[in-house]
Amino acid sequence: MKTVFQFIERIAPSFLRYSLALILLWIGALKFVDPSPVRMLLSASLPFLAFNAFVYVLGALEIIAAILLFAGVWVRYVALLCLVLFAGTLTIFVIAPGVTGFPFLTLAGQFLLKDVVLAAAAVSVAAMDAAKQTYNQQIVQIAS
């Protein structure tokens, strides 16, 4: 079992980062295929944002974030952007509880609730990247 856990420990940061990137890429691309589900959700909660151009901007941000995560570029900052995106989605629970059916969740509420886990993943990715950079800086200081 020790070998299994060592393997898991070694792949966990990359696996989480790539998983988050894949989800962002997919949900971002779907906004370009059909923006109407997101627009309808926005019209019921944040009507001033319920237009296609806004949905396309969200989709573009998600796709750009996914690409940067896949590439391993600016990881902690991209993860913070993701946290902002997921927090924005979760504000619908506060702003429009009728849409989410809180505490007895509607299908829309169940769909939105996944963003709690995605936000936790984004925080973890940012923390792991920051820890990696701190470790690398300490190694450089020791070597010099």
Image: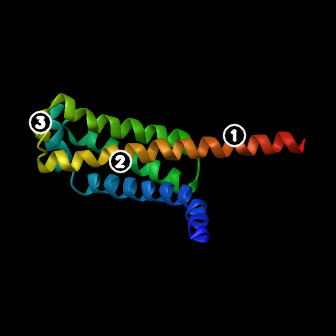
Closer to us: 69 or 49:
69
**Circle 3 or circle 1, nearest the eye:** 1
- Residue in the foreground of this view, choosing between 48 and 69: 69
Q: Residues within 10 Å of mark 1 (few under 14, many from 20)?
A: few
Residue farthest to the right, as pictured: 144
Q: Position of residue 116 (x, y in %)?
A: 33, 43
Q: Amino acid at mark 3?
A: Ala
Sequence order check, earlier mark of 3 and 1: 3
Q: Quadrant of residue 127?
A: top right
Q: Nearer the viewer, residue 32 or 18?
A: 18
Looking at the rendered structure, the kind of residue marked 2 is Val
Q: Secondary structure at mark 1?
A: helix
Residue that numbered label 2 is attached to:
117
- As drawn, the label of residue 134 is 1
Quadrant of the drawing holding the C terminus: top right
User: Does 118 appear above or below 25?
Assistant: above
For this view, does 140 lie left or right of residue 95? right
Q: Could you tell whether 129 is left or right of 140 in the image?
A: left
The kind of residue on which mark 1 rests is Thr
Neighbourhood count class around disc 2 (C-alpha, 10 Å): few under 14, some 14–19, many 20 upward: few
Horizontal side, residue 49 vs residue 135: left or right: left
Residue 44 image label = 3
User: What distance separates the C-alpha of mark 3 from that of mark 1?
Assistant: 44 Å
> From this viewpoint, is residue 142 visible?
yes
Select label 2 or label 3 by which is in front: 2
Q: Residue at x 63, y 42 (%)?
A: 131
Looking at the image, tell me whether mark 2 or mark 3 is earlier in sequence order. 3
Q: Position of residue 21 (x, y in %)?
A: 45, 55
